[in-house]
Amino acid sequence: MATKQDAARSGARLPHELDDRQRSLAFFTVLTAVVLEVADSTIINTALPAIRQGLGASPAAMQWIVAGYLLTLGSLLLLGGRLGDAFGHARMFLGGVAGFILASALCGLALSPTQLVLARILQGGAGAMMGPQTMAIVQLLYTPIERVSRLAYFGMIIGLAAIVGPIVGGFLIQLNLFGLGWRLIFLINLPIGLFALLLGRTTLPRTGEEHRGLAIDLGGAALFAAGFGAVLFALIQAREWLGMRGAAPLLLLGLALVALGWRRSVRRRTAGLPAMIEPALFALRSFRWGVVAATAFSSASIGFLMIFAVSLQQGLGLTPLGTALVHIPFGAGVMAAVALIVPRLLPRLGRVLPMVGGVLMAAGIVAVLMLIRLGVGHGALLITMLALAGVGFGTLSGPLGPIVVSDVARTHAGTASATLRTAQQLGGALGIALVGTAYFSVSGHDAAARLQGLLPGAITVALLLAVAIFAVSRLPADLFGAHRRGPAH
């Protein structure tokens, strides 16, 4: 076990030894990594036509360029979180960032579709090592109440990065700096990642309690990775190839593997052995219902953003840039909610605030989709409804991060963060499947018919948000009460 003297000899500081400026720099470092990880899951969408033309990629290869990243990211998040708990969050974060830089360079230098797919798979794996450490490091830096405003930014950044990613991708391709074209969307990660790597080496805290040499349950890691990989593949890829009915056996297989991984973790923890998941986390009411809320919210938001962009382009005939600009009021609403509403009202209103946010988000989204269904692609009413949906988005999503980890012991911060991120990945894939199926099953081939699926799509999104609101209602009324702290908090 590391000691304070070990940390001092390595030049690292313990969390309580950092002043406000140093904590802010450490927070900015991990926030930069969040932007890299999330943006790279959406920025690729804008570049797909250019990549297809430049590399001569087949439709199947194009799908794998997108899905390969998401599959490895979602499948390995639990392993990344457990490694952070075992060997130190700062160490795993820096290693993940370094791997992400290398994989991004390989993506930018790819000469064939196969090389690009393999590089994207490596990129997702590096993201899975890096991602779970971000929330865990914030948990080390701040007290539960201080985390409210800090972790709320994660909800904002994740939402905005998903929206801004395609805009930045289009701009970089249009810029065509040095004739690099689509390669810039990957190579831009190099200077950003190097900056985060260098800054992180001097600012990130060490706990002084890393469990050096702690064994990792490789059998459990394999079960969860295979299970989550099968679930994600069934929802993202097999559904497109075989339809939901054809993908169902693979989905059931994945769920069965996850169940086996869970049972293995329970048995090992009962026997005092290390496990991939900490079952005791789910005994915490705030963690259990917070994860359910985050999963349902992710399904609703990802599903909405997909049919929103598709209907604007294929239904109303907007260009990709025009579609991106329509997103601006939504993004502005998210920023306003997270920066102004959540930090001020969450400590006072508790679970009531995200519940109200869910209602506002549902009302705004349904109104937006119905306006588009009527052929409205601009105007004050659409802007107002988009801003309302964005405010609801930020007010619901911003508190979820602080809520999920509010009662989690710091020794399990990486595992808790990874569990949340895995739930969000699975929720996003589920949203694509459910909302996408509801939308495309009704939409026709001509422009007007492509808008008809917006009604069942809106209903599906509203139902998913209803699940999120119900889960939030099951949270403790006193979200950050000191009397509810988990062991060794």
Image (cartoon, rainbow, N blue to C red):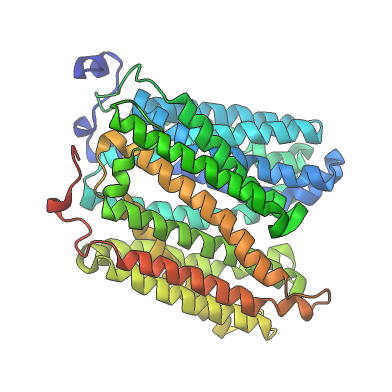
Q: Is residue 380 left or right of residue 180?
A: left
Q: Give me the residue at 47% from left, 61% from top.
A: 296
The answer to whether 283 is drawn above or below residue 390 in the figure is above
Q: Nearer the viewer, residue 47 or 2?
A: 2
Q: Position of residue 38 (x, y in %)?
A: 54, 47
| Quarter containing the N terminus | top left
Q: Nearer the viewer, residue 310 or 431?
A: 431
Quadrant in the picture for residue 103: top right
The answer to whether 272 is drawn above or below residue 48 in the figure is above
Q: Give me the residue at 20% from left, 67% from top.
A: 348
Q: Position of residue 238 (x, y in %)?
A: 71, 50
Quadrant in the picture for residue 134: top left
Q: Position of residue 403 (x, y in %)?
A: 30, 55
| Quarter containing the C terminus | top left
Q: Nearer the viewer, residue 23 or 130?
A: 130
The reply to whether residue 263 is in sight is yes
The answer to whether 211 is drawn above or below residue 237 in the figure is above
The reply to whether residue 204 is in sight is no
The mark total stands at 0
Q: Give me the residue at 33% from left, 41% from top.
A: 279
Q: Give me the residue at 68% from left, 46% from top.
A: 66
Q: Nearer the viewer, residue 105 or 459?
A: 459
Q: Position of residue 52 (x, y in %)?
A: 83, 45
The answer to whether 439 is drawn above or below residue 46 in the figure is below
Q: Is residue 85 left or right of residue 406?
A: right
Quadrant in the picture for residue 293: bottom left
